[in-house]
Image: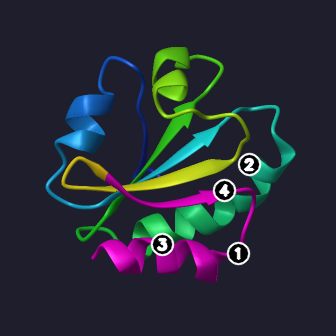
Amino acid sequence: MSDKIKHVGDADFDREVLQSAEPVLVDFWAPWCGPCKMIAPALDELAATYDGRAKIVKVNVDNERQTALKYHVRSIPMLLVFKDGQIHGQQIGAVGKAQLAQLIDKAL
C-alpha cells in the first residue's frame, strides 16, 4: 500500500477528513472485501498523482463502526469525496482508476 494513503478511524476522522484543507477521497473498505482489494492499486496510484492537491484515506468498516454508521455504509467499497467538511461526491462499488480520478477532479 502507498505511504501516501492514511488509515483513519472514529477518533481522527473529523480532524483528517472533515477539517482537511484539501479534498479527501475516503475509501470505506474491509480486508475480506474482494472488490476493495481490486481498486487498491488504483487508489495507490491516485494518491501519488494527487499528492499535495487531495488526500486519499481508508476507513476499515469492521474496526471503525461509528464512522461507517454515520455515513450509512451498507455496501463496500464505498467511496466518498469530502470538500470543506461536506460530502461532494460518492461512488459505491469497484470502478476503474479514471472514474475515481473524476470523483477527485470534481472536488478540485
Q: Which mark is residue 103?
A: 3
- Choose the circle earlier in sequence order: 2 or 1: 2
SS at badge 4: helix
In space, the residues marked 2 and 1 are separated at their CA atoms by 12 Å
Q: Is residue 83 above or below residue 71?
A: below
- Choose the circle earlier in sequence order: 1 or 4: 4
Relative placement, left or right, of 46 versus 94 is: left
Mark 3 or 2, which is nearer the eye? 3
Identify the residue position indicated by label 1 in the image. Answer: 96
Q: Residue 10's x, y, as percent?
A: 39, 19
Q: Residue at x 61, y 83 (%)?
A: 98
Which residues are the magenta region?
A: 87-108
Identify the residue position indicated by label 2 in the image. Answer: 36
Mark 4 or 3, which is nearer the eye? 3
Mark 1 or 4, which is nearer the eye? 1
- Choose the circle earlier in sequence order: 4 or 3: 4
SS at badge 3: helix
Q: Amino acid at mark 1?
A: Gly
Q: Which mark is residue 40?
A: 4
- How crowded pointer 3 is (Cα within 10 Å; few <14, some 14-19, many 20+) is rated as some
Disc 3 + disc 2, Cβ < 8 Å: no
